[in-house]
Amino acid sequence: MNEVASIYWFRSDLRLTDLPGLSAASAAGPVLACYVFDELSDDAWTLGSASRWWLHRSLSALGSELQKRGGKLILAQGRPEAVLTQLACEIGADTVFCSREYEPCSDDTERRVAESLAENGLRLKRYGGTLLWEPEQVRTRSDTPFKVFTPFWKCCLTLPEPNLAAGGTLRFWQGQSAAGVSLENLGLDCTDDESARWADYWSPGEAGAKESLRVFEESALDGYNEGRDFPERAATSLLSPHLRFGEISPHRVFHFIREASRGRPDLQSEADSYLRELGWREFSRHLLYHHPSLPEQPFRSEFARFPWCGVKESLIAWQEGKTGYPIVDAGMRELRQTGYMHNRVRMITASFLCKHLLIDWRAGQRWFWNYLMDADLAANAFNWQWVAGSGTDASPYFRIFSPMAQGVKFDKAGAYVKEWVPELSALPPRYVHSPWEAPAAVLDDAGICLGDNYPFPLVDHVTARKTALAAYDEVRAA
């Protein structure tokens, strides 16, 4: 007797290994793989340009891998409920399998798909696979969601370890219909000057994710605790965009790092620190699930009254990396050129926007959303609110990073700054983080004319700090 086919609906889980829903679908019968690009969604957070670039290449890699294994990837545009119902009826499938997602629009999308399928006598089955633990699993003793990271992570580590999905041979539907649309017709790819450079830095797809994890374990895990704060060092895993698109599961990363440090006391602290960062990602997604307004509204309601007063010209200077503060400018230029910014520098640039320029954190969040390869709604909103002081478990309002001190501490010789702000490349390390302090002769020797080929500081640090503290005190006193 012929087995009934099923559909696997790929979403932010673009891989073939450690994918519970795909394993379950294949165990039930032959599978047709499908990805639906819903650009007409009501969700305000449509993909930014960097994410579109990455998605194009990730779908290409997934399609190629499916083809090697005897399957194919159907690409479609439109509402998932309409596309999936029509496709299921066309091939005689009785079930659509997928991974659960946790963003504000996801429950509504999954509900619409389930209702549309049910009207035709079909089912939607969803599985975990994008988080280590489900949001319902991690609760305080009073049975409420956590609002502070450290107790959240301690609770997580008392739970059963996340399991890898069962392996096995994947079986694919071999019918001839359901042609779909071409990848090019999805209109995801970018062709501007910035995106032309991105391929020099990234290899989207499951194979690229596995290679990034291997390289990190071999060359950077030992020394991660110290190295991760220095932007000129290759000391981080660069897995964030791969995790964002589900090209590798957090479960696999978790177990890989645990296994790498097993029996290695010298690596245990490094591994624990890295897994804590994985936990930070987890926390942000749990938080967004429980508080879906996080990308739009301050978590701490009193910050709705914060007197943001920054001007458009300052925002543009920040976006273009022309603030006159070298480490801020280096980070913003790295972002534009590579689709990435080192985490330490993300904190510095975000703090500068909110606390030196008094520009609303939501403007920075939007800019990062468009240019980051790893643009993740939960992490982006959570981290911006953390820096601004308006979020749960936020950075103290009075913590205002000095760009000069941060530069000296984490880029003492100026290697990072000089890579991304080449007009400062001939400046001695003593002045690289504060060019305005350099004597005229030093500036002349370095070929720098402040106000001409490199800007004067957009604001004075001491004055900006006092203004920001006064604004935060105003909020606290209200």
Image (cartoon, helix red, strand yellow):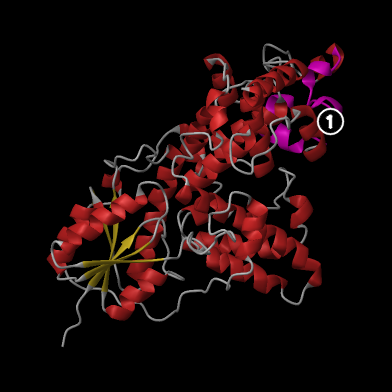
> Where does residue 86 sit, x and y in percent of width and height?
15, 59
- Left/right of residue 354 with respect to residue 365 in the rendered view: right
The three-letter amino acid code for the residue at tag 1 is Pro
Q: Secondary structure at mark 1?
A: helix
Q: Quadrant of residue 320?
A: top right
Q: Quadrant of residue 454?
A: top right
Whether residue 374 is visible here, answered yes or no, is no
> Where does residue 162 sit, x and y in percent of width and height?
54, 71
Name the residue carrying label 1. 429
- Left/right of residue 246 with respect to residue 2 in the rendered view: right
Q: Which residues are magenta?
A: 412-439
Whether residue 185 is visible here, answered yes or no, is yes
Q: Is residue 454 above or below residue 413?
A: above
The structure residue drawn at horizontal position 33% and vertical position 80%, both measured from the top left corner, is 27
- Left/right of residue 465 with respect to residue 389 in the rendered view: right
> Where does residue 182 sit, x and y in percent of width and height?
26, 52
The structure residue drawn at horizontal position 15% and vertical position 68%, both measured from the top left corner, is 91
